[in-house]
Image (spheres, rainbow, N blue to C red):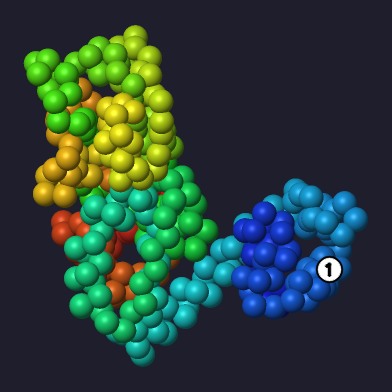
Amino acid sequence: MKLHQLRYLHEVARHGLNITSAAEALYTSQPGVSKQIQLFEDELGLQIFQRNGKRLTGITEPGAQILALAAKVILDVENIKRVGDEFSNVETGTLTIATTHTQARYKLPAAVKAFMVNYPQVKLNIHQGNPKQVAEQVASGEADIGIATEAISSFESLLCLPCYHWNRCVVVPHGHPLLADGTLTLEKLAAYPLITYDFAFTGGTLVSKVFSDAGLSPNVVLTAIDADVIKTYVTLGLGVGLLANMAYDPERDTHLAMIDVSHLFPDSTTYLGVRKDAFLRGYMYGFIELIAPHFNRDAVNAALKTVAHSK
């Protein structure tokens, strides 16, 4: 049993049982990956993957347990490397952030700029996805830190730190009837075609619940993951836009008027998530504090210690 065989197993599972994609990610050949998996299965005397001819079609019951252990071994090896790097190359390394478009576009830029100034030798990667994808990337070790709203906090393997609260606004073209119709209500909002986030993003399920609890069915004519796309179609007159208040910039969005709707919806919370069992480099603590100043290194370690004792 060899470490590289565990890496091959892990990558094949991570790439949806596509050996070719796994081989590309590993910078090796597809036959080489297949051979090592076969050798590993022969050594254990059991199948990890179900097959139809040469194609992998599923994961066996013992295979699922082995893959879970392999993922832990790979993370432990990565942690060992990080410990070595932390004490030999404190200011160098790689930081991978997984986040949603709204956070990447409107909340992260200032922190990213400051981080790059503070840690010029650290390579920074930003991956975008919906909250579930963000959480999965952190849980699998693909990303070091995840930043997203609501859903990320439901992953048991992650320590999620509340960063900040936010609410929503409605954007409409200047002269729109809603601007002269007094206090905006859910009933008034539901009377117009609505353009908003895909319900997998930025608290979308909370929005749908608020309407449902009020006995209303909004006429959602278009959904997008990108607030700029929402604003583009509002400008074209296709509907009114419901988006995060942080996504409206009065200096750049002068062609649109904004109506605050924080009285209609409860606040959403953006969380920052890290694996409970990950070793955090010094610069990772630095990035966390840039995003959430109330979580310095001591506060993060105290939170990690609390979850470790609660197991």
> So how many labels did they put on this image?
1
Quarter holding residue 22:
bottom right
User: How far across and how far down the image is residue 245, in percent?
Assistant: 19, 39
Point 49% across, 63% down: residue: 142
Quarter holding residue 121:
bottom left
User: How far across and how far down the image is residue 160, in percent?
Assistant: 33, 50
Q: Which of these two is toward me, 266 or 253? A: 253
User: How far across and how far down the image is residue 178, in percent?
Assistant: 17, 20
SS class of the residue under badge 1? helix
Point 37% across, 77% down: residue: 123
Point 41% across, 25% down: residue: 221
Point 39% across, 24% down: residue: 220
Task: Name, please, the residue furthest toward the right.
Answer: 53
State whether residue 94 appears in this view: yes
Q: Amino acid at mark 1?
A: Gln
Dot 1, how many residues are within 10 Å of its Cα: few (below 14), some (14-19), or many (20+)? some
Q: Is residue 137 found left or right of 88 in the rendered image?
A: right
Which residue corresponds to mark 1? 38
Q: Which of these two is toward me, 74 or 310? A: 74
User: How far across and how far down the image is residue 96, in percent?
Assistant: 40, 67
Q: Is residue 165 above or below residue 19?
A: above
State whether residue 155 appears in this view: no
Q: Is residue 52 found left or right of 220 in the rendered image?
A: right
Quarter holding residue 294:
bottom left
Image quarter where the N terminus lies is bottom right
